[in-house]
Amino acid sequence: MRVYTKKQQEEISTETNIYDAFVQHLDSIYFPGASEVLNTELIVFEYDSYKESYA
């Protein structure tokens, strides 16, 4: 079993929140459900751009 410190747990929680916000952003700029059907390379590019802008 892996043990996490409180700081690590907060970072994991923050990363999850950033990704959830990204999925909502992606769905708003493309179309609902876009995160499930777009090309993986496009999603990676958009995610990197999103992290630079908002994270």
Image (cartoon, rainbow, N blue to C red):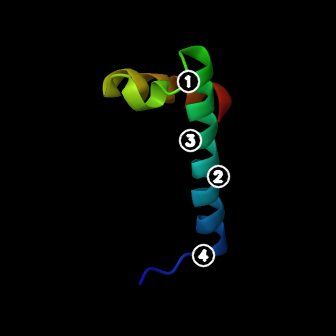
Residue displayed at 56% across by 41% down: 19
Q: Nearer the viewer, mark 4 or mark 2?
A: 2
Between 24 and 32, which is closer to the camera in this rendering?
Answer: 32
Residue 34's place in the image compared with 15, above or below, is above
C-alpha span from label 3 to label 1: 16 Å
SS at mark 2? Answer: helix
Spot the residue most to the top. 30
Q: Nearer the viewer, mark 2 or mark 1?
A: 1
Residue displayed at 64% across by 52% down: 14
Residue matched to label 3: 19
Q: Nearer the viewer, mark 4 or mark 1?
A: 1
Residue matched to label 1: 32
Crowdedness of circle 1 by 10 Å Cα count: few (<14), some, many (20+)?
A: few
Q: Earlier in the sequence, mark 2 or mark 1?
A: 2
Residue matched to label 4: 5
Q: Earlier in the sequence, mark 4 or mark 1?
A: 4
C-alpha span from label 4 to label 3: 21 Å
Q: Position of residue 51 (x, y in %)?
A: 57, 32
Q: Position of residue 5 (x, y in %)?
A: 60, 75
Instruction: Say if mark 2 contacts mark 1, CB within 8 Å.
Output: no
